[in-house]
């Protein structure tokens, strides 16, 4: 009789340990998300300060040959992109929402210029990192955007009245 009772007790203990382990995993995941938010907050504070104080912008930005105003715009575009990426990382948005937000952002000419100017930066990211994968998705979005503009132009040409 003692063996079946011990077996049941052992099974109950294993189930309880599994629940505790699952809880610890959830706590660790939440701590990770919280740390990402805190790190982003620090980065955003640096960006804000560099946007407000142009001499600091030069220290933070790696882009050369641009005006003070353009540098501020590029830093702000970076901040917006980072916020969208953070939203996905912490689970506030899903993949579909991430891609939709990035597509909307791609319509902004300042972001489009930022994306073009920072292509080299993305080239040094580990290929399978989240940032590299999202970067490739934005590259595809930007290509689609250009294709849509080309299609509009071609359609527009046919509907233009001929001169003379």
Image (cartoon, rainbow, N blue to C red):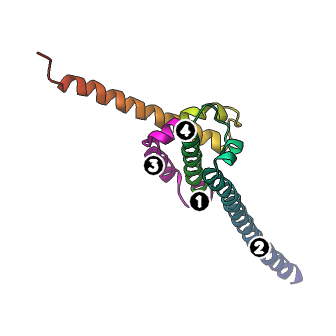
Q: Which residue is mark 2?
A: 20
Q: Which residues are magenta?
A: 88-114
- SS category of the residue bearing label 3: helix
**Precedes in sequence: disc 4 or disc 1:** 1
Q: Which quadrant would residue 130 be assigned to in this image?
A: top right
What distance separates the C-alpha of mark 1 from that of mark 2?
A: 23 Å
Name the residue carrying label 3. 100
Q: Are marks 4 and 1 in contact (CB under 8 Å)?
A: no
Name the element at disc 2: helix
**Among the two numbered marks 4 and 2 on one chain, the one whose residue lies closer to the N terminus:** 2
The residue wearing badge 1 is 91
Report the side of 103 relative to 125 (left or right): left
Q: Residues within 10 Å of mark 2 (few under 14, many from 20)?
A: few
Give the x, y percent position of residue 59.
72, 43
Q: Earlier in the sequence, mark 3 or mark 2?
A: 2
How far is disc 4 from disc 1 in space, using C-alphas?
26 Å
Q: Is residue 113 shown left or right of residue 28?
A: left
Q: Residues within 10 Å of mark 1 (few under 14, many from 20)?
A: few
Q: Nearer the viewer, residue 88 or 16?
A: 88
Q: Nearer the viewer, mark 3 or mark 2?
A: 3
Whether residue 113 is in magenta: the answer is yes
């Amino acid at each position: 009789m003692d063996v079946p009772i011990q077996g049941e007790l052992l099974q109950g203990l294993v189930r309880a340990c599994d629940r505790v382990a699952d809880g610890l995993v959830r706590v660790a995941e939440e701590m990770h998300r919280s740390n990402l938010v805190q790190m982003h907050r620090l980065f955003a504070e640096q960006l804000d300060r560099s946007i407000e104080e142009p001499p600091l912008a030069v220290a933070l930005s790696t882009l050369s040959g641009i005006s003070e105003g353009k540098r501020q715009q590029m830093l702000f575009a970076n901040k917006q992109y980072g916020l969208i990426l953070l939203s996905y990382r912490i689970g506030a948005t899903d993949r579909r929402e991430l891609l939709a937000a990035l597509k909307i952002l791609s319509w902004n000419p300042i972001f489009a210029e930022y994306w073009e100017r920072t292509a080299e930066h993305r080239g040094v990211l580990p290929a399978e990192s989240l940032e590299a994968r999202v970067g490739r998705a934005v590259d595809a979005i930007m290509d689609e955007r250009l294709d849509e503009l080309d299609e509009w132009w071609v359609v527009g040409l046919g509907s233009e009245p001929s001169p003379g």
